[in-house]
Amino acid sequence: MNFSKQELKASITDGLLSFPVTDFDANGKFDADSYRKRLLWLKEYEVSALFVAGGTGEFFNITLDEFREIVEVAVETIGGHVPIIASAGQSAELAQQHAKIAQEAGADGILLMPPYLTECSQEGIVEYAASVCQSTDLGVIYYNRANGYLNVNAVKSLADQCDNLIGLKDGKGDMQALNITIKTLGDRLGYVGGVPTAEIIAEAYLAIGVSTYSSAVFNFVPDMAVKFYKALRQGNSEFVAKATREFFIPFVTLRDTTPGYAVSLIKAGADIVGYPGGRVRAPLTMPNGDQVNQLKKLVEKAKSL
């Protein structure tokens, strides 16, 4: 661990956040050399934290052994440059194992994913999240989405129980509910925009005080992603509108043609720009030839922006 909980919290409240894809070789195995090359490339751009084995990194598709290696490679490659935050989740027991592995490997924090599949009560989700927070010394960011969505009272309960809960990542995009949570808990937590292609509602996030978000497209158009973020923070509404209209809306339209393309298109984009990470693992599927051609045109548009 190279960053304190306070530094970790600061990193997720100001700056663009990177969620790199996870590299697989031709046989579908984790490719450490390719992953290291990717991290060194992305290191050259301005981000405030690196989330490894996140949603874009196919956390849901990797084994515990692969998870350990991914975190170790990230720490060895760019540890100390920015905070390295590793995911945990699936079940309380597995999430605690993820947190233990991440801490042993030198990660600076944990992004706690929702529990796997099952429907559950607010009390049950709080118990799940608290058990993971209390199992680690690392700062924890809770990913508030899907079947693990917590309302304001549940978030407050979790924060009251766990001093090392330092952040909340929004994965729902409900601005009313998020605004209520922010205004209720204030600066007790740091807040992160985390819907797929978060740039599409970045202006709405910023309006209620959420100034950071996870950028999946940073994986293949990092120059434009950073420029968009800076324009947003500087109030350059003309560029934000232009980039949204000419890149992000067409990208989201393409993304929404097939479930899972929020990840698959990112890997295809990385391939287009010369940093291939292999295919996604089932049940995800790669885009077809026509969709790849559409994506290539969007990459060129991003370069022109």
Image (cartoon, rainbow, N blue to C red):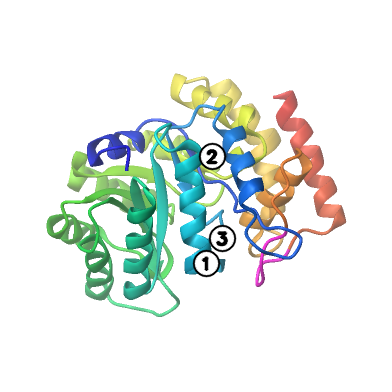
Label 3 crowd (10 A; few <14 / some 14-19 / many >=20) = some
Place of residue 175 in the rendered image (x, y in percent of width and height, measured from the top left): 38, 48
- The numbered disc on residue 60 is 1
Please give left or right for residue 243 compared with residue 73 in the image: right
| Residue 282, magenta (yes or no) | yes
Place of residue 148 in the rendered image (x, y in percent of width and height, measured from the top left): 36, 67
Quadrant where the image shows the N terminus: top left
Contact, CB < 8 Å: mark 3 with mark 1?
Answer: yes
Please give left or right for residue 183 compared with residue 170 in the image: left
- The numbered disc on residue 58 is 3
State the extent of the magenta-drawn residues as a range.
279-285
Place of residue 156 in the rendered image (x, y in percent of width and height, measured from the top left): 18, 56
Q: Amino acid at mark 1?
A: Phe
Cα separation, mark 3 vs mark 2, equals 20 Å
Q: What type of secondary structure mainly makes up the magenta span? A: loop
- The numbered disc on residue 199 is 2
Give the residue displayed 75% in from the left and 31% down from the top. Answer: 301
Q: Amino acid at mark 3?
A: Glu
Q: Is residue 131 above or below residue 23?
A: below
Cα separation, mark 3 vs mark 1, equals 5 Å
